[in-house]
Image (tube, grey):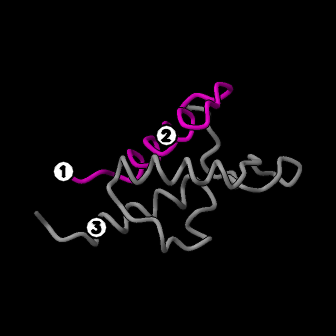
Amino acid sequence: MSLTLIEIESTIVEIIIERLELEDYTEEDFPREQILFALPEEGGLGLDSIASLEIVAGLSEEFVLDFDDIAREDFMTVKSLAGFVLRQKQAEPAE
């Protein structure tokens, strides 16, 4: 069964909220197009490199993908991460 982009986005948001303990957000109100690692005064969420490691660990576990070669532009927002995951999953050989 393949996941839709919206389902992948929701899973990514859940992982970010849980792993980073962002209790101020719910899955419904998390800013999916906001840059994850830009400072808040620059319009971002202000996450740091430790947060990126937590996110990658969670995504690797959930989606069973290798994130070693992810491009910077794919790791900017929840939407760009979801697009990366979807492309990787679509490229996997059928079981």
Q: Give above or below for 69 relative to 28.
A: below
- Residue type at the position of mark 1: Met
Q: Is residue 58 left or right of residue 42?
A: left
Please state if 2 lies on the left or on the right of 78 as rendered. Answer: left
- Residue 15: give its label: 2
SS class of the residue under badge 2?
A: helix
Question: Which element type, helix, strand or loop, lies under badge 3?
Answer: helix
Mark 1 lies on residue: 1
Q: Position of residue 44 (x, y in %)?
A: 77, 51
Tag 3: amino acid: Gln
The quarter holding residue 24 reads top right
C-alpha distance separating marks 2 and 3:
21 Å
Question: Badge 2: few (under 14), some or many (20 or more) residues near its Cα, within 10 Å?
Answer: many
Between disc 1 and disc 2, the foreground one is 2
* Mark 3, residue position: 90
By secondary structure, the bulk of the magenta-drawn segment is best described as: helix
Q: Which residues are magenta?
A: 2-27
- The dot on residue 34 is none
